[in-house]
Amino acid sequence: MEVIFPIRGHRCSYQFDDGNVCTFDSYPERITGILLHSLGMIKKFEEGKNLHIRTNGSKQHSVDFKVGDVFLEYHPVSMGEVKK
């Protein structure tokens, strides 16, 4: 598993094979980014273009990924939600 999803580094950053270093907001978002890249759906992450696209000018209000013309917002279920 660590080959596919390496142990997280500082602030969930990840360096892809092409040297592109990307910082994700969370570990689950990082895993999703690695999957999108490995499937060829996003070749290179660009902040504001296909990663963390601001919806009202604030990073606090942004969509996680843009794949082609599709926006993808990812929120994993927390253990508290599972228990409920």
Image (cartoon, helix red, strand yellow):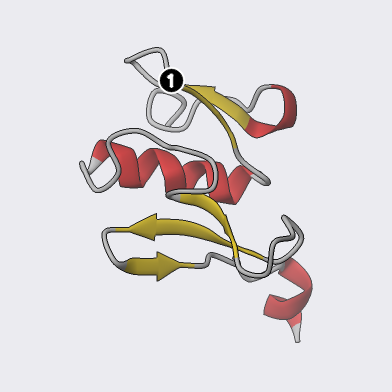
Q: Identify residue type, mark 1.
A: Asn
Q: Residue at x 65, y 33 (%)?
A: 12
Q: Residue at x 54, y 41 (%)?
A: 47
Q: Position of residue 53 (x, y in %)?
A: 55, 57
Q: Residue at x 30, y 43 (%)?
A: 42
- Tally the numbered discs: 1
Q: In this image, 19 relative to 42: left or right?
A: right
> Residue 13 is drawn in which quadrant?
top right
Element assignment for label 1: loop
Q: Does 67 sit above or below residue 8?
A: below
Q: Residue at x 27, y 36 (%)?
A: 43
Q: Position of residue 71 (x, y in %)?
A: 41, 68
| Residue at the limit of the structure toward the left, as seen here | 40
Q: Which residue is mark 1?
A: 20
Q: Does 55 sit above or below residue 44?
A: below
Q: Position of residue 68 (x, y in %)?
A: 26, 59
Q: Position of residue 57 (x, y in %)?
A: 69, 61
Choose between 68 and 72: the one closer to the eye. Answer: 68
| Residue at the limit of the structure toward the front, as seen here | 57
